Image (cartoon, rainbow, N blue to C red):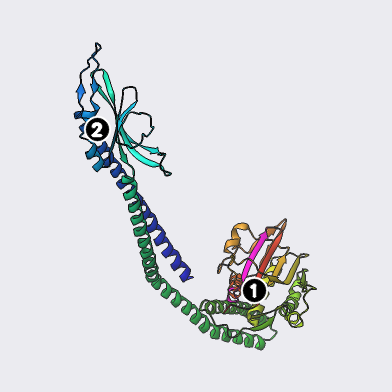
Amino acid sequence: MFQATRRRLALWYTTVTAVLLLLFASGVYLYVRSTLIERIDDTLNHVVEVVERSLVIESGTTDLGISHINIEATFRDNTDTVEDDHIDLEWFSPTGKLLWSTFSQPLNIPIRLNRMGETVTVSPPSSSSPLLLRQVTDRVEIGRQVLGYLRVSHPWFEVTKPSRQLMFDLALFTGLMVLSVAASGWFLSGKAMEPVHESYQRLKQFTADASHELRSPITLIQTNVQVALADLGSREEDLHYRQQLKVVERLTQRLGKLVNDLLFLARQDSHISKENFSPCPIDALLMEVVEEQKLLADEKDITLSLKLIDPPASETRLELLDNWFTLIGNWDQLVRLFTNLISNALQYTLAGGRVNVELARIEVINRVSGLRYSTALQIQVSDTGIGIPAEAIPRLFDRFYRVDPARTHTVGNTVTKSANGSGLGLAIAQAIVENHEGQIQVESRQGLGTNLTVTLPITLEC
């Protein structure tokens, strides 16, 4: 229980920290990437301004007086500079025709005015991999005359290369931090659970000690009450005392049962050893329990039956057939388990109803459910009783939990009152099943009955 809680705490620490680190790393990545893009766009715009200032404009010689750019004089001095900065220039005529370029081959990208920068994909004929460029395009005018278009390009790898390196560094940093937090969370959750674990251990020890110490005085009270009852005569005054002593006897018996139940649960919580486990023929055990419960069933006019599912006809191994329903367990605990389940079924079944007990040997295939064995015995205890509300089933095995605190149930026009109990019967049943590394499941519908399924491994895991 504490290990599961510790794992959950460590997992929560790790998950929360991982989410925060992921958000932080994403923010850093997006900020750095946007900064790199802004820096490239600023560089491209600066180049556009420098080139525009260095344009050699010649006045028109025709009657129309149209000016034009002296391409050779303008771009002659810019070629070496832009190559050093990995920047390429393109000059287009007013009609969009490429007149000059630093690219070895034309890009065949239409002119789109964009001073804010855009990313384009180019597929050069001589290269199989596409080329990404960041481009800024500006229209050059003098007065109302368009002299041409200037497009400046910058390789996109200037952004992707540092971005990828940053992503790798952030991923590595985040992974190392998550592992560090997981280890720290496991350590801190263990430290946080230590006081709780110590308190729980003291509580278990107190329950066990108190239960053990109470057994002797309760037994002594019962003995004295029985002696007093034997000494009373038949006078009217003695009959009155006898009635009072009978009440005391019933109460002490109930208290003694409660103390024994608490002591059993305390020992189970302390993980008692399995040294008393031995081969137990469950078919013989169920026959004894059913025979003992027959008296109560007959008194309530309830049909109690036991059904054993025979081995398949294909099984011919005599040794296995002789031990078909035998498992390794504690005989006394298993008797208590099935006595509790069958007596509960009889208790909440009305007169004329049925309680069926079925025993079968099964092969467990689904290991995802947590079962650690492949062959098991399955015992089903089903009744036609009053049933259990759906909302009560998840808490059915809680200690001292009662489905109906008033201990009364109504079915049709019939009201039945359950026997007094402490609410520990099913908690003890679950503890015994878990001590045998098995599972117990409940299916119930109000007014139709309840089916409890106990699955116990043939052989316990070491």
Amino acid beneath label 2: Val
Q: Can you tell which mark lies on residue 456?
A: 1
Q: Residue furthest right?
A: 313
Q: Alpha-carbon distance for marks 1 and 2? A: 82 Å
Task: Tell whether 68 sits left or right of 211.
Answer: left
Quarter occupied by the C terminus: bottom right
Determine which residue is flagged by label 2.
48
Q: Nearer the viewer, residue 215 or 340?
A: 340
Q: Could you say where residue 35 lies in the image, as x and y percent from the top left? A: 28, 44
Q: Tags 1 and 2 in contact by the CB under 8 Å rule?
A: no
Label 1 residue SS: strand
The magenta span reads 434-445
* Residue 414 percent location from the top left of the image: 72, 59
Question: Image height check: is 338 above or below 142?
Answer: below
Location of residue 79 (image quadrant): top left
Query: Is residue 77 visible in this depiction of the protein?
Result: yes
Q: Which sits earlier in the primary sequence, circle 1 or circle 2?
A: 2
Of residues 84 and 456, the one nearer the viewer is 84
Against 82, residue 32 (above or below) is: below
Residue 2 in percent (x, y) is at 46, 71
Which residue sits at x=73%, y=70%?
A: 357
- Residue at image point 63% right, 81% down: 330
Residue 439 highlighted magenta (yes or no):
yes
> Which is more foreground, mark 1 or mark 2?
2
Q: Determine which quarter of the picture holds residue 321.
A: bottom right
Q: Decide which of 395, 19 is in the foreground and name it.
A: 19
Magenta stretch containing residue 181, yes or no? no
Q: Residues within 10 Å of mark 1 (few under 14, many from 20)?
A: many
- The amino acid type, in three-letter code, at marker 1 is Leu
Q: Is residue 84 above or below residue 173?
A: above
